Image: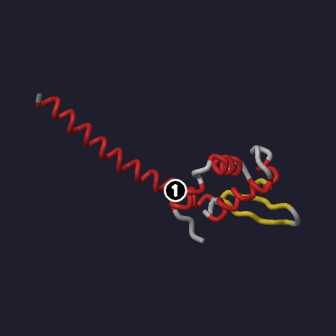
């Protein structure tokens, strides 16, 4: 599944999943290790990991009984590009508005 902006934003719309991404930005971790940071069951954390995995933000591998999680940067990179594009467009609009307002002030 190819990561989409919509999927990335939806997955990051939950504070627990943001916390998981933050933890994984420091390195790989097992689901059990991730679960220690949250007041919920292991099963609950696993559901959040699944949402992140479906969005392409996390990859999991299972070795024996341990499920390891790893952050996948491409989905975050795409979201970052999109956010930066939107920021540039709005900054341009606000700069033009500022110029207009300044010229109006000078005319009065």
Helix, strand or loop at label 1? It is helix
As drawn, is 101 to the left or to the right of 8? left
Name the residue located 56 percent from the left edge and 58 percent from the top edge. Answer: 8
Name the residue located 64 percent from the left edge and 65 percent from the top edge. Answer: 54
- Front residue of 16 and 75: 16
From the image, tell me which residue sits under label 1.
79
> Going by the picture, which residue comes out furthest to the right?
64
> Going by the picture, which residue comes out furthest to the bottom?
1
As drawn, is 104 to the left or to the right of 60? left
Give residue 55's quadrant in the image: bottom right
Name the residue located 56 percent from the left edge and 57 percent from the top edge. Answer: 10
Q: In which quarter of the image is the C terminus?
A: top left
Q: Position of residue 35 (x, y in %)?
A: 78, 49
Disc 1 crowd, CA 10 A, few/some/many (<14, 14-19, 20+)? some
Q: Where is residue 76 in the image (x, y as percent from the top left)?
A: 57, 56
- Front residue of 13 and 5: 13
Task: Report the label total.
Answer: 1
Q: Position of residue 74 (x, y in %)?
A: 58, 61
- Front residue of 43 and 98: 43
As drawn, is 75 to the left or to the right of 30? left
């Amino acid at each position: 599944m190819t990561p989409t902006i919509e999927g990335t934003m939806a997955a990051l719309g939950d504070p627990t999943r943001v916390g998981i991404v933050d933890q994984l930005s420091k390195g790989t971790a097992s689901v059990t290790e991730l679960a220690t940071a949250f007041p919920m069951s292991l099963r609950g954390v696993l559901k959040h990991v699944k949402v992140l995995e479906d969005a392409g933000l996390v990859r999991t591998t299972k070795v024996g009984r341990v499920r390891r999680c790893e952050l996948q940067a491409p989905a975050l990179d795409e979201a970052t590009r999109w956010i930066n594009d939107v920021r540039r467009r709005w900054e341009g609009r606000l700069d033009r508005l500022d110029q207009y307002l300044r010229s109006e002030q000078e005319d009065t």
